[in-house]
Image (tube, grey):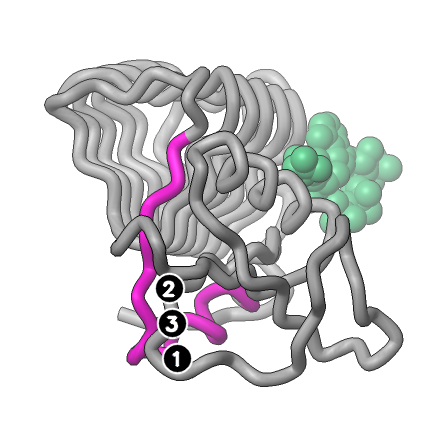
Amino acid sequence: MDKQEKLFLFGASGHGKVILEIAEQLGIPVGGFIDADPGITLVAGYPVMREVPARAPMVISIGNNRTRARIAMAHPGNIYPVLIHPRSWVSPRAIVGAGTVVMSGATIHTETRIGRHCIINTNASADHECRISDYVHISPNAALAGDVAVGEGTHIGIGACVIQGVRIGKWCTIGAGAVVIRDVPDYTVVVGNPGRVIRKTDEFISLS
Ligand SMILES: CC(=O)SCCNC(=O)CCNC(=O)[C@H](O)C(C)(C)COP(=O)(O)OP(=O)(O)OC[C@H]1O[C@@H](n2cnc3c(N)ncnc32)[C@H](O)[C@@H]1OP(=O)(O)O
């Protein structure tokens, strides 16, 4: 994206405010937030608009993976930059997809591939050769060992860890603090140590 172009953040929640500060750290000018709530007009000193500016650079600053996916599909004409906090480590051999945000302290090691509109949250890590699909959220302090695959739209909860070589399906939720030692089927919720499936996810969505 052109350094002079203003970035817009879709979603004026706390998550949006964290992303705002990454943009500020990177010296990217921010034009404001977009949010449907008419009661919100100003956030952190920035205006909040209702309409998405056509073709403008935008990051979808909404934590819910399904909502982020739906907004991305509804606005295919916008430019989606990658935001990487300056105090994170992203290997030069890693690939990070459009619209993905990497937060402070996160580590992404060699040959890991991350899809579009993902969140790699505070101090999360993805070790070597992981494959993280679109719309995934790796929560704060979650750790993926080497060669882990995470399917589209899956949420890895705060402090969860996943041993090497595990395949996690799409639109799953891995609970806070879970220890995942076996492959996880699509559309399931896993909690505990060792991680066990407790139910199917509430809402199915297939985008691929
Ligand atoms: C910056 C940020 O804020 S990023 C956001 C980070 N947030 C997260 O990581 C949240 C992750 N979410 C969780 O861990 C949730 O507890 C979920 C999604 C796994 C389950 O939520 P719910 O579906 O509402 O389940 P609910 O709370 O009803 O619990 C169901 C059962 O699972 C157990 N359970 C729920 N979560 C966990 C967990 N993380 N570990 C172990 N057991 C759990 C409950 O104790 C309960 O057991 P019981 O039936 O024996 O009483």
Q: Write down the region rendered in magenta.
A: 67-84
Q: Is label 1 or label 3 in front?
A: 3
Residue type at numbered disc 2? Pro
Q: Which residue is mark 3?
A: 56
Question: Is the CB of mark 1 within 8 Å of ligand 1?
Answer: no
On the rendered structure, is 101 left or right of 198?
left
Query: Which residue matches tag 1?
Result: 75
| Residue corresponding to mark 2 | 57
Label 2: element kind? loop
**Which residue is at a point 46% across and 55% down the rendered structure image?**
171
Residue 37 percent across, percent down from the top left: 79, 76
Is label 2 in contact with label 1 (beta carbons under 8 Å)? no
Q: Which comes sooner in the sequence, label 2 or label 1?
A: 2
Marks 3 and 2 close (CB-CB < 8 Å): yes
Quadrant the N terminus occupies:
bottom left
Tell me which image quadrant ligand 1 sits in: top right
- Check the image and report above or below for 93 versus 21: above
Separation (CA) of disc 1 from disc 3: 10 Å
Q: Amino acid at mark 3?
A: Ala
Percent coordinates x, y for residue 202 in the rendering: 64, 64
Q: Of discs 2 and 1, which sits in the foreground?
A: 2
Amino acid under label 1?
His
Disc 2 residue lies near ligand 1 with CB under 8 A: no
User: Which corner quadrant of the image does residue 101 belong to?
Assistant: top left
C-alpha span from label 3 to label 2: 4 Å
Taking the view exactly as shown, the residue that stands out farthest to the front is 4
